[in-house]
Image: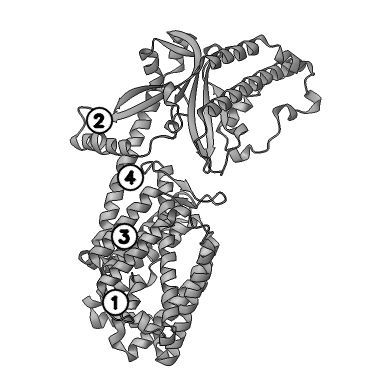
């Protein structure tokens, strides 16, 4: 909107309505192309911004040399003292406007996820700061000769022959800056979702090479609607600038507080230095905050309203999710109880495989007990499936599933962690998924039998040797995928001096326990797979306070009903589903 305002003094008849309409058209176009990603046009960002800063520096130097180079004296901080003595209350209002000279600096913190610290430091110190300083000093020099141009100082200070090129560059730079803020918003929302502080939303990765290039449709359209409403209601860059000023200083103060906590708790910096940091930076930011707070009634209320709204949503979601997870962990079925039930689980075991989806990576979820109570029989093989996403583009099919046993062998119960990369699309046919799952389970059973045979052979080879070999295959379940890439086969990792005889492989193939398990697995596979889906709900206890009941029973329930469902529910065939619900009282 500020870039398009340059047409108001240059094109006849271009009034406020035309400014608002043209700004809305550009906003709609900008948000509409987000789904295509920035990778295809990202190569234009650096040249355009470099040209933009070069233009600011050149125009600033030109105005300094032409009108009044003595404004360089403003670098002396003594003049700000004289300014406050002379203007008193009006000086505070002007100081709030000075914050707008550094708008965009808050994007630096969000961009830490896309650029290195060193590159940001060099860009702000060697390019951004000197160019902005020269631009503003040039405008000050121009105002000494043309004080009536204060309302449109940027475009009026541009030499007439350069107006249209500068206008095009300014518009492109404004769009790129807006694009940077949109991308930063996507990144912040994704990080909040990963921390369990924001409702689950659909995330689309627009690049196979860069994990940071994402697109969140709901946030994109929400931002577009809100931007259009703000532009349509305020119809002036002055009020929007006041709102931006409060958001700017607020981000800086929050960053100062968080960095101070990191210095104390993580870096364990010297206490004196850790105290000096917030005193120096915090005092300056507090002064600016007091100045911009005078603009609350003039548009400054907008970021406060948005911040309150999102803080409320994030707090409700995080609090409800934590209570739900704590309830699931607290009410897990104990192994002692499973042993008391025996291998029949206290019911009838019929041929078949039951896939129970849940979010727990350890223990037996309480919802499994609900299935045991509700169903007249349970499947002969039970697999607890947990979907996890790892920070790599694509997970190879042979490394998709990781297994471990949950109970003794005669229970035929396993836990499966299904891993997907951020570019993996979970739309494979259910038969392909089931086939890969069964093949991976068979591989696990064979590896387990091999390790048992190797351990037995090693013990026979050195009877005085204490065996400390653990189930390495099981231990690898919790290891990140990137650390397991291209690893050798387990059979090739043993030293030749202690390598067992070739008879181990043949004895493993003739192992009756292994053959029995494989035969039972094939029989269960032939009988079919059933997907056991659990729906957990959270409700406040009757004796809870009214606020807790309102938050948990209504607000959190509303968010759960309307947010994106869990990953497990996306590719499940509807013909083979058994669902059970469970309510946790908190």
Q: If you read the primary sequence from the N terminus, does the residue marked by circle 3 or circle 4 appear first?
A: 3
Q: CA distance from mark 2 to mark 1?
A: 58 Å
Q: If you read the primary sequence from the N terminus, does the residue marked by circle 3 or circle 2 appear first?
A: 3
Q: CA distance from mark 3 to mark 2?
A: 37 Å
Q: CA distance from mark 4 to mark 1?
A: 42 Å
Q: If you read the primary sequence from the N terminus, does the residue marked by circle 2 or circle 1 appear first?
A: 1
Q: CA distance from mark 3 to mark 1?
A: 21 Å
The residue under label 3 is 227
Q: Assign a secondary structure to mark 1.
A: loop
Q: Quadrant of the N terminus?
A: bottom left
Residue 506 vs residue 241: left or right?
right
The residue under label 1 is 14
The residue under label 2 is 540
Indicate the quadrant where residue 364 lies: top left
Find residue 456 and report its horizontal and vertical position in percent.
Answer: 70, 16
Q: Assign a secondary structure to mark 2.
A: loop
Q: If you read the primary sequence from the N terminus, does the residue marked by circle 3 or circle 1 appear first?
A: 1
The residue under label 4 is 314
Which is closer to the viewer, label 3 or label 2? 3
Label 2, residues with CA under 10 Å away: few <14, some 14-19, many ≥20: some
In the displayed image of the protein, which residue is found farthest to the left? 546
Q: Assign a secondary structure to mark 3.
A: helix
Q: If you read the primary sequence from the N terminus, does the residue marked by circle 4 or circle 1 appear first?
A: 1
Q: If you read the primary sequence from the N terminus, does the residue marked by circle 2 or circle 4 appear first?
A: 4
Q: Is residue 80 above or below residue 247?
A: below
């Amino acid at each position: 909107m500020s870039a398009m305002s340059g047409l108001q003094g240059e094109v006849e008849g271009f009034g406020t309505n035309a400014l608002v309409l043209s700004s809305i058209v550009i906003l709609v176009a900008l948000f509409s192309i987000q789904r295509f990603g920035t990778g295809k046009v990202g190569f234009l960002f650096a040249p355009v911004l470099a040209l933009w800063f070069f233009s600011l520096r050149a125009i600033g130097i030109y105005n300094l040399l032409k009108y009044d180079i003595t404004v360089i004296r403003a670098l002396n901080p003594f003049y700000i003292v004289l300014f406050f003595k002379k203007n008193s209350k009006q000086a505070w209002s002007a100081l709030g406007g000075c914050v707008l000279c550094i708008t965009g600096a808050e994007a630096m913190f969000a961009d830490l996820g896309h650029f290195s610290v060193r590159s940001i430091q060099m860009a702000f110190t060697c390019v951004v700061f000197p160019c902005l300083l020269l631009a503003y000093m040039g405008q000050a020099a121009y105002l000494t000769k043309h004080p009536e141009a204060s309302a449109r100082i940027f475009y009026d200070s541009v030499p007439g022959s350069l107006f249209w090129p500068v206008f095009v560059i300014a518009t492109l730079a404004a769009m790129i800056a807006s694009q940077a803020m949109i991308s930063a918003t996507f990144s912040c929302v994704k990080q909040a979702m990963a921390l369990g502080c924001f409702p689950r939303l659909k995330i689309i990765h627009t690049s196979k090479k860069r994990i940071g290039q994402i697109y969140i449709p709901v946030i994109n359209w929400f931002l577009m609607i809100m931007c259009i409403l703000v532009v349509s209601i305020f119809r002036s860059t002055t009020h929007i600038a006041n709102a931006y000023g409060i958001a700017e200083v607020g981000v800086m103060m929050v960053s100062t507080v968080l960095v101070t906590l990191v210095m104390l708790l993580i870096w364990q910096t010297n206490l004196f230095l850790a105290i000096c940091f917030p005193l120096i930076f915090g005092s300056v930011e507090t002064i600016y905050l007091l100045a911009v707070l005078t603009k609350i009634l003039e548009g400054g209320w907008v970021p406060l309203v948005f911040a309150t709204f999102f803080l409320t949503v994030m707090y409700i979601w995080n609090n409800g999710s934590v209570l739900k997870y704590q309830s699931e962990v607290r009410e897990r079925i104990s192994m002692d109880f499973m042993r008391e039930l025996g291998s029949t689980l206290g019911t009838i075991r019929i041929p078949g495989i039951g896939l129970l989806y849940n979010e727990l990576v350890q223990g037996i979820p309480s919802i499994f007990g609900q299935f045991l109570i509700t169903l007249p029989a349970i499947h002969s093989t039970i697999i607890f499936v947990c979907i996890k996403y790892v920070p790599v583009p694509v997970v190879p099919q042979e490394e998709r599933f990781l297994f471990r046993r949950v109970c003794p062998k005669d229970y035929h119960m396993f836990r499966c962690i299904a891993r997907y990369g951020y570019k993996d699309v979970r739309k494979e046919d259910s038969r392909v998924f089931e086939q890969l799952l069964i093949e991976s389970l068979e591989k696990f059973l064979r590896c387990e039998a091999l390790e048992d045979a190797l351990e037995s052979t090693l013990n026979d080879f050195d009877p005085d040797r204490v065996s400390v070999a653990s189930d390495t295959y099981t231990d690898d379940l919790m290891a990140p995928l990137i650390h397991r890439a291209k690893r050798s086969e387990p059979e090739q990792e043993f030293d030749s001096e202690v390598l067992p005889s070739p008879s181990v492989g043949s004895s493993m193939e003739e192992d009756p326990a292994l053959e029995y398990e494989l035969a039972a697995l094939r029989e269960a596979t032939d009988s079919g797979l059933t997907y056991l889906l659990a729906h957990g709900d959270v409700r406040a206890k009757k004796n809870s306070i009214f606020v807790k009941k309102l938050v948990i029973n209504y607000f959190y329930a509303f968010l759960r009903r309307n947010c994106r469902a869990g990953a497990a529910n996306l590719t499940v065939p509807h013909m083979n589903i058994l669902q059970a619900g469970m309510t946790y009282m908190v």
